Structure formats: structure tokens, C-alpha cells
Amino acid sequence: MRLFLCAAAVLAAVLAVSCSRTEPAAASESSSASGGSPSAPPAAPISARQRIVFLGDSLTAGYGLDIEQSVPSLVQKHLDEEGYAYEVVNAGVSGDTSAGGLRRLDWSLDGDVRILVLELGANDGLRGLPVADMKKNLKSIIATAKARRIQVLLTGMEAPPNYGEAYTSEFRRAFRDIAAEEHVAFMPFYLYQVAGIPALNIADGMHPNPAGARTVEANLWRSLEPLLDKRNR
């Protein structure tokens, strides 16, 4: 439990800083859960290759890192090294919530998407938004993906401890419940073995540095690899 509280406190700081430093449209999304979606990253050109889409917030976008150091880029490199022909799409937007991700889902799933890595909910927890609403949004995203025959890897998050143990426990449990109810692959905590470790974060002590991103990627790969089509090599 102590590890969870520490990680949650660090995660809250991560998101607070990333939201305060993002582009104006993303900052607007951070200020109101009912506002418009944060500005979307440029749409990637459609490729003939099968795609793996990372739908997330600043932790997916790679805040503080060069684009090639972000987790999705590291996954692309890992796939290339293993001989897989997938194309990884980084659909991370700093400050995004589960509602924002749902609103931009359709264009994020352009192309021949086979796997969706769903890394959303952290900003919901940062703002203390209703867990039931977050759960509904994430399940809607998963339902849309399933309807398109897209496999889903859901990554868990932690809420900051200042909302109380009841909220943080409900928040943590929501991800596990979704994974069980929807029968999707699950990574319990995206920042596992990274949150709160100075050597794995950039100078602000809150965002994963290149080494931290590599740790996240290594942990995520263990959940992602079983979803890969071995024929796509």
C-alpha cells in the first residue's frame, strides 16, 4: 500500500506539471472535464501496415523526451528488432482524460489497427472525477475497438491520495474490473518500477527520462507480446 500511495502522489505531480506546460488547447481540457477535447496530434498518414495505436495522455505522448525516446517509439524499435511488420501510432495528448480519449477515438483508429494500447484515466484521477464516469468512458472505448476486431491492452493508473482511501481504492479497482469484465489484456500500473525513482525520471523528478521510458516499455512489452500475430513477421 505504501508503494501505491507514493506512486500515486508522484503521478499526480507528473500530470499537474504536464498539464501546465502543454499547448493552450490541452491546458483548456485540463481545466474542465466538460470542455472540448485537447488539440489532437497531427494525423499520421495511412499506411498499408497493420497498426498498434497508443491512445493516452502525456505519459504516452512522451513529455520531456525526444519523440524517439517515447514509449510508443521504443515499442516500434522493439517490434522492428523482433522482425514484426507493425506500425506503431502515438496518439498521446497531454492533459487528456478518458472522456477526451473517447471523443477522439474514431480518427485515432484510422488505418488497419490490430491492437489498441489504452493508457487513459490518470487525469480523471488527478481531478477527482467520478470513477463510474471514467469506467463508462474506458468501456466505451474498448467496445468500439472490439466492434472493429481490435485487441485491447488496458494499462492501470493510480489516483492521488489526497482524495481519500475510498476514492483511490475505487479508482485502482476500476481498471482491474474493466479488464476482467471486458476480457482484455491488462498492465496493472503503467509507471511500475519508475514512479518515485529519481534515477528514472527527468530533472523535475516527475517524468520518466529515457531510462525510465525504457523500463516502462520493457514492462509493457510483457503484456503486449502475447497479442502480436506471429504471422506478421
Image (tube, helix red, strand yellow):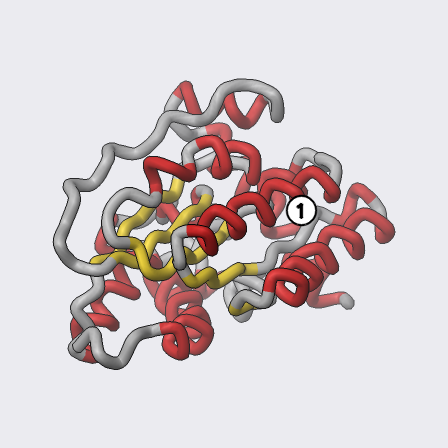
Q: Residue at x 39, y 58 (%)?
A: 150
Q: Is residue 49 left or right of residue 132?
A: left
| Residue name at image x 50 percent, y 37 percent | 102
Q: Secondary structure at mark 1?
A: helix
Q: What's the residue at 47%, 55% (across, down)? A: 146
Quadrant of the snapshot with the C terminus: bottom left
Amino acid residing under circle 1: Lys
Image point (56%, 34%), residue name:
99
Name the quadrant of the N terminus. Answer: bottom right
| Residue 144 rendering spot, x and y as whole percentages | 48, 46
Residue 20: percent from left, percent from top: 49, 28
Give the answer, above or below, for where 187 lies relative to 69: below
Q: Quadrant of residue 38?
A: top left
Q: Quadrant of residue 208?
A: bottom left
- x, y percentage for residue 139? 60, 49
Tell me: residue 84, above or below residue 57. below
What is the total number of numbered labels drawn onto the structure image? 1
Residue of label 1: 135
Nearer-the-camera pick, 132 or 8? 132
